């Protein structure tokens, strides 16, 4: 077993374990296991808002999931549905070779 395999196994056993950090999420009609974090979104975008002096805050969330769970991640400015809520994709980060983190803002209306 090489290092890549060990890291992948740790992701499966700990981080994407529904008994630990993860939960089932319906993402555009596909059920995936993901980690949802409002704090991760706030850490990135509230700091940015403060630096820019905009003082704006959107109702946002970050969702981290395994790359193998979605063939193609959404792109910034896409509209997606998460657990029945329409969201706007602000940013997509590829984290190493295993996961994606998508920053989303709720579309009210």
Image (cartoon, rainbow, N blue to C red):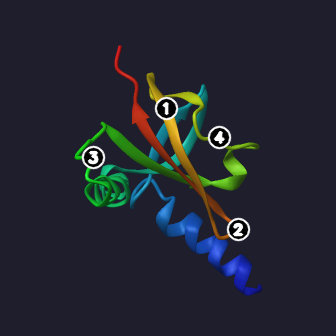
Image-quadrant location for residue 100:
bottom right
C-alpha span from label 3 to label 4: 24 Å
Which residue is depicted at the point 32% across and 55% down?
A: 52
Q: CA distance from mark 2 to mark 4?
A: 18 Å
Q: Which element is circle 4 on?
A: loop
Q: Which of the two labelled residues, at mark 1 and mark 4, occupies the earlier sequence position?
A: 4
Dot in front, 2 or 3: 3
Disc with the residue nearer the chain's start (2 vs 3): 3
Q: Position of residue 63 (x, y in %)?
A: 47, 48
- Disc 2 to disc 3, how far (Cα)? 34 Å
Say left or right for 60 vs 91: left
| 55 to 80, vertically: above or below | below
User: What residue is shown with label 4?
Assistant: 75
Residue in the picture at 60% in, 31% down: 78
The quarter in which the C terminus is drawn is top left
Front in this rendered view, residue 5 or 47: 47
Image quadrant where residue 98 sits = bottom right
Q: Tell me where residue 32 appears, x and y as whole percent.
A: 58, 42
Q: Are marks 2 and 4 in contact (CB under 8 Å)?
A: no
Residue sticking out furthest to the left: 55
Residue that badge 2 annotates: 97
* Res 30 quadrant in image: top right
Q: Residue at x 57, y 34 (%)?
A: 77
| Sequence-first tag of 1 and 3 | 3
Q: Residue at x 62, y 60 (%)?
A: 99
How busy is the neighbourhood of tag 3: few (under 14 within 10 Å), some, or many (20 plus)? few
Q: SS at mark 1?
A: strand
Find disc 1 in the rendering and name its residue.
88
Q: Sequence-wise, which precedes: disc 3 or disc 4?
A: 3
Q: Measure how far apart labels 1 and 3 are at the Cα level.
A: 19 Å
């Amino acid at each position: 077993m090489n290092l890549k395999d060990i890291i992948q196994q740790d992701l499966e056993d700990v981080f994407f374990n529904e008994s630990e950090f993860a939960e089932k999420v319906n993402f555009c009609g596909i059920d995936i296991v993901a980690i949802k974090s409002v704090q991760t979104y706030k850490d990135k975008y509230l700091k940015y808002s403060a630096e820019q002096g905009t003082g704006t805050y959107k109702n946002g969330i970050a969702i981290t999931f395994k790359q193998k769970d979605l063939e193609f991640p959404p792109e910034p400015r896409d509209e997606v549905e998460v657990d029945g809520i329409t969201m706007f994709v602000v940013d997509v980060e590829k984290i190493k070779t295993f996961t994606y983190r998508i920053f989303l803002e709720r579309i009210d209306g």
